[in-house]
Image (cartoon, coloured by chain):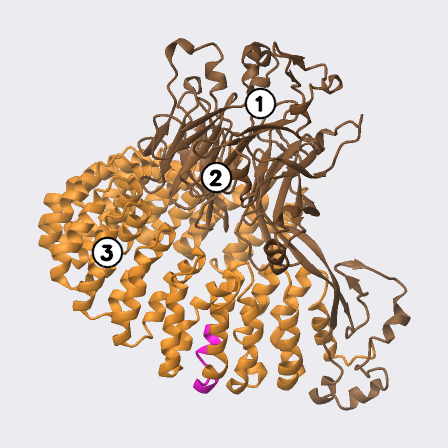
Chain colours: A brown, B orange
């Protein structure tokens, strides 16, 4: 798009849509809080997961009329009026609360991650996971079938399993059209040969009028994680995926739910020696053998599955770590350097990482330091002590890269999120608020009523509200569009 | 119900249940599709049933899988080969579903039908189907297409053959790795139908592309193709085209590819002949035996014997044996275990002298391995060594190994060694057994774990079979009968089951004189479980003991038990009495 060149400061982000907007004063139900967002590869579908274990799917509507229409519009230079528009498609209950009796542990239903898989036969496939169990879902349009004209009358006409009417007997006579059997039962007995009998057998008639979306759980990958699963990621071979918990990464075949292979094991022989945990893991977008995982110590490891079956010891390709100047170390350094999320760029050349204070862009060919660092909320640095006391310092913010690799985005507090230009020489740094008017913060001084008791002003008068953190967001894979979760609401922006 | 004729009624039910809401009923109907078809007749099957199945195919996977399977054997029901093509449309749709096992089954059925179809029908119906699938919008269709080429190709015209080859090469370059994997898997089958001239050019080109695929999963499958293609080619072509590939594969960056090579390598030896085996494949195999990755060494170690068999003994001693020595002290227990499970087979290959000089020390060190699986694997294959060098050289080391396994704290290990005791007994001979192992066999009868006691009882029976009743009378029966007074009823139960197992082997006389009195004594046991088991054992004695003993001893005992206060005891003794009466009546 030409916009980039025209507005060097960056794109002008505009509100596009909101789903589940909260009315003023409405209390948020815990189960409705969104805990995962993911666009599919084409960007035509968006999935969100929530703490109640539900997965909600959205589908793009502005493209539905067909690509031709859109191309015509673009040719007419009307594309500026076009922005991705989604509508609610369906939802399903992916996970239920469970209880592990052996370990006496409650397992929350909260969806930690969603990943889209390869589409096939117009059916959508996705993986969703809570702390322990990964599920493979198929969502497909199913015809609603109506079966009638049975040979015998017992079964009532059904519509996909639901008995519709109970006034059957009379209305069913009509269905017996080619049976002709009630004329003369004796006839059969006299000519009890197959030929005569044949005419009285017929196949039921199936008619279908409408379709409905049906989500079916195809596979359940369970009992492979002792700790909480923080990531799942598909391999480019469309055959395998990984799941990572605090200490281990397992490799699964999508078709086999009974076994997985452990490929990284960070569990020390003695748990007292534990110094770091795995925080996030992702496959390289095109190299089937490469995967990266981040740790609570602020490092990212790129490993090669070809080198060894168990990749935790000697087969590191590269470790990415930034070495801090010794003087700058503080009590919080270790905590805030913990990486909460990593994402590969589309081509796989770069990895974006998010730690508590910054976003960092790494070149996978250079481990010595990031190629770019973006301060997300530097004004919080003097407040680290408070943030530590109320545990906010352990919040896990996600990050994302735009499809063209030109921008990166991540969330902050007060329902704010930031978008940075990451192309060479770009100074773009935008702060947006997840409301219908995303840019109002920049123009106005923050309105007082926005502040909740948990919030406070820092020395510069910037307010922040720790209860309204924006942890989850996703970039559209091909257009300038961002979806982000502000507690139970899904906000979408475009530029 | 009177409206429908009786014989038709079950069929009508079956037909209706094709669309029942209960998946089990639908499944049942689909499984009986042939019954429905027979009732409808060939013509109506063709004109109504098959189209009906084609249209109603968005069912559950289990139902679709069953349908795919049934249609594969449906030719007789549609009117024979002449009409075989009517079965293609429903299977074609099943070839496109997302569930892999349904697609695989549909492809299998299509192949089965296709291989019977008349040549002209193949050209008219089957080949267009393959082309349609290969051009399918979704990868599922294209994946299925790959598995059908070897059926379609032979009957195609020259022009069509060229087209099919081109289509296949496109499939090998498909964007979706699943399609390339399928093309790679099926390449061997397809290549077998292609003329030698094209094999060397086009197919080898396809193969070469697959061997360089970015996706490890595709290259893995290309390794399997090596052996298949190697067998099709002339030795010199195999040496020119396949050998370099396999040598490169054996040094592939991905351990999974090397793992596949380790598994497949020996198959290629025959295809290339002895000289290239010696110069290229042996070094490649030796590299794999010394691979950095334990998984690769496991695979390679597991093929040591198969590989050695192909080589001359000199080569095996010179190249393979040194590696085997290293592997026997490998850091990975799984490598040692894999080695232990096959290494005994090398003895016949190497001959007596080399076995004694070279292999024996390795056997002995593996017999002392800290990991029980390794020791068990050695013991399980003892017979192979015995044939070559006799057991004496090993027996001194065997005993401690067996005793240790017999007392292992994991009951599965104990169970495994018990299973091998009859084999050991037959190899080691009576003398050795009496001295060393007899006591162990009795000890297991009093194991804390039921499965062990059960296996121990069974073991006694197998030993009695091996060494004969006379031996058993001396070495087993007295010891077993001694234990019958054990204060613990579960142990008495074990003895009871041992007796019932031994009785048929020992024969009528010993059963009556030795075993029966003990069983009768147990009928007075204070534990009801023992008493009803006595009833069961007595019933099992019926074919063994003769009639007079039956009337004199068995029946009175059972009659008494039939009055037992315990309901189960009464039940089983009554059953036994009925059985006796039946036998009496029939004689």
Residue B244 located within the stretch drawn in magenta: no
Q: Name the residue that disc number 3 marks.
A: B246
Q: What count of labels does the image hold?
A: 3
Cα gap from disc 3 to disc 1, whole angstroms: 51 Å
Provide the residue designation for mark 1: A395
**Is there any visible trace of residue A374 in the rendered image?**
yes
Q: Which mark is residue A405?
A: 2
Segment tinted magenta in the rendering: B110-121
Classed neighbour count for the residue bearing mark 3: other residues with Cα under 10 Å, few (<14), some (14–19), many (≥20): many
User: Residue A356 appears at what percent x and percent y?
Assistant: 52, 21
Decide: is B137 above or below A187: above
- Label 3 residue SS: helix
Q: From the viewer's side, name the closer residue of A434 and A235.
A: A434
Which corner quadrant holds the C terminus of chain A? top right
For the stretch drawn in magenta, the main secondary structure is: helix
Tags 1 and 2 in contact by the CB under 8 Å rule? no
Q: Left or right of B29: which side holds B478?
A: left
């Amino acid at each position: 798009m030409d916009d980039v060149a025209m507005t060097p400061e960056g794109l002008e982000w505009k509100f596009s849509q909101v789903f589940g907007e909260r009315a003023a004063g409405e209390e948020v139900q815990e189960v409705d809080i969104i805990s995962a967002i993911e666009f599919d590869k084409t960007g035509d579908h968006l999935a969100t997961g929530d703490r109640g274990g539900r997965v909600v799917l959205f589908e793009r509507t502005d493209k539905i009329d067909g690509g031709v229409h859109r191309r015509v519009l673009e040719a007419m230079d009307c594309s500026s009026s076009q922005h991705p528009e989604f509508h609610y498609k369906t939802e399903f209950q992916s996970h239920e609360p469970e209880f592990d009796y052996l370990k006496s542990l409650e397992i929350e239903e909260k969806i930690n991650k969603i990943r889209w898989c390869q589409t096939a036969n117009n059916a959508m496939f996705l993986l969703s996971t809570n702390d322990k169990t990964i599920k493979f879902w198929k969502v497909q349009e199913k015809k609603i079938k109506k079966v009638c004209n049975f040979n015998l009358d017992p079964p009532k006409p059904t519509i996909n399993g639901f008995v519709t009417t109970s006034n059957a007997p009379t209305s069913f006579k009509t269905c017996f059209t080619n049976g002709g059997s009630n004329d003369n039962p004796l006839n059969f007995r006299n000519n009890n040969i197959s030929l005569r009998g044949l005419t009285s057998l017929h196949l039921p008639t199936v008619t279908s009028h409408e379709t409905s979306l049906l989500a079916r759980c195809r596979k359940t990958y369970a009992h492979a994680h002792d700790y909480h699963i923080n990531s799942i990621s598909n391999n480019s071979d469309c055959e395998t995926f990984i799941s990572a918990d605090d200490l281990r990464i397992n490799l699964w075949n999508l078709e086999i739910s009974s076994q997985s292979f452990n490929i990284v094991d960070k569990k020390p022989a003695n748990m007292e020696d534990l110094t770091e945990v795995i925080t996030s893991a992702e496959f390289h977008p095109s190299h089937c053998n490469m995967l990266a995982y981040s740790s609570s110590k602020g490092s990212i490891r790129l490993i090669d599955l070809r080198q060894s079956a168990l990749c935790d010891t000697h087969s590191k390709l590269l470790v990415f770590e930034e070495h801090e100047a010794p003087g700058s170390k503080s009590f919080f350094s270790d905590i805030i350097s913990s990486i909460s999320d990593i994402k590969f760029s589309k081509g796989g050349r770069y990895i974006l990482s998010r730690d508590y204070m910054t976003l960092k862009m790494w070149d996978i060919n250079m481990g010595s330091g990031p190629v770019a660092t973006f301060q997300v909320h530097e004004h919080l640095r003097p407040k680290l002590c408070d943030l530590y006391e109320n545990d906010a310092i352990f919040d896990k913010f996600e990050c994302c890269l735009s499809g063209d690799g030109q921008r990166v985005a991540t969330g902050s507090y007060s329902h704010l999120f930031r978008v940075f230009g990451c192309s060479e020489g770009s100074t773009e740094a935008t702060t947006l608020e997840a409301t219908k008017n995303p840019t109002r913060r920049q123009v106005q001084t923050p309105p007082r009523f926005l502040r909740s008791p948990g919030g406070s002003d820092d020395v510069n008068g910037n307010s922040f509200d720790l209860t309204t953190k924006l942890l989850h967001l996703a970039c559209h894979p091909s257009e300038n569009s961002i979806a982000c979760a502000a507690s139970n609401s899904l906000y979408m922006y475009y530029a | 119900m009177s409206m429908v004729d009786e014989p038709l009624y079950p069929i009508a039910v079956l037909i209706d249940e094709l669309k029942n809401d209960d998946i089990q009923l639908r499944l049942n109907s689909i499984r009986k599709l042939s019954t429905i078809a027979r009732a409808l007749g060939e013509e109506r099957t063709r004109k109504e049933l098959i189209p009906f199945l084609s249209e109603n195919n968005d069912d559950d996977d289990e139902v679709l899988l069953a349908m795919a399977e049934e249609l594969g054997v449906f030719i007789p029901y549609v009117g024979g080969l002449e009409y075989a093509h009517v079965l293609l449309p429903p299977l074609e749709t099943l070839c496109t579903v997302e569930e892999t096992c349904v697609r695989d089954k549909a492809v299998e059925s299509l192949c089965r039908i296709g291989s019977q179809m008349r040549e002209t029908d193949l050209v008219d119906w089957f080949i267009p189907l393959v082309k349609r699938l290969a051009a399918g919008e979704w990868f599922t269709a294209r994946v299925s297409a790959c598995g059908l080429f070897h059926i379609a190709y032979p009957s195609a015209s020259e022009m069509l053959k060229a087209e099919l080859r081109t289509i296949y090469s496109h499939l090998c370059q498909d964007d979706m790795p699943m399609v390339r994997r399928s093309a790679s898997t099926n390449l061997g089958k397809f290549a077998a139908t292609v003329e030698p001239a094209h094999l060397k050019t086009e197919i080898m080109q396809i193969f070469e592309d697959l061997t360089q695929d970015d996706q490890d999963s595709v290259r893995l499958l290309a390794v399997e193709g090596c052996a298949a293609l190697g067998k099709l080619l002339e030795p010199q072509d195999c040496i020119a085209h396949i050998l370099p590939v396999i040598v490169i594969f054996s040094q592939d960056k991905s351990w999974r590819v090397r793992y596949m090579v380790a598994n497949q390598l020996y198959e290629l030896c025959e295809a290339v002949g002895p000289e290239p085996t010696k110069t290229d494949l042996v070094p490649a195999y030796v590299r794999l035996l010394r691979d950095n990755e334990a998984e690769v060494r496991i695979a390679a170690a597991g093929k040591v014997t198969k590989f050695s068999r192909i080589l001359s003994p000199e080569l095996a001693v010179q190249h393979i044996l040194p590696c085997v020595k290293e592997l026997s002290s490998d850091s990975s227990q799984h490598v040692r275990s894999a080695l232990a499970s096959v290494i005994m087979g090398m003895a016949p290959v190497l001959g007596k002298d080399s076995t004694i000089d070279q292999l024996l020390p390795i056997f002995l060190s593996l017999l002392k391995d800290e990991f029980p699986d390794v020791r068990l694997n050695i013991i399980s294959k003892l017979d192979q060594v015995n044939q070559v060098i006799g057991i004496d050289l090993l027996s001194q080391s065997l005993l401690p190994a067996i005793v240790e396994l017999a007392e292992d704290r994991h009951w599965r290990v104990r169970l495994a060694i018990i299973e091998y005791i009859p084999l050991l007994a037959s190899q080691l001979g009576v003398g050795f057994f009496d001295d060393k192992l007899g006591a162990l066999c009795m000890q297991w009868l009093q194991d804390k774990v039921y499965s062990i006691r059960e296996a121990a009882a069974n073991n006694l029976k197998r030993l009695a079979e091996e060494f004969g009743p006379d031996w058993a009378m001396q070495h087993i029966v007295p010891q077993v009968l001694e234990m019958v007074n054990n204060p613990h009823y579960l142990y008495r139960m074990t003895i009871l089951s041992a007796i019932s197992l031994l009785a048929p082997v020992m024969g009528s006389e010993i059963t009556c004189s030795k075993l029966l009195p003990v069983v009768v004594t147990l009928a007075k046991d204070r534990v009801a479980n023992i008493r009803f088991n006595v009833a069961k054992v007595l019933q099992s004695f019926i074919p063994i003991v003769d009639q007079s003993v039956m009337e004199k001893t068995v029946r009175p005992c059972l009659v008494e038990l039939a009055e037992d206060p315990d309901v189960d005891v009464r039940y089983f003794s009554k059953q036994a009495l009925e059985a006796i009466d039946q036998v009496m009546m029939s004689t």
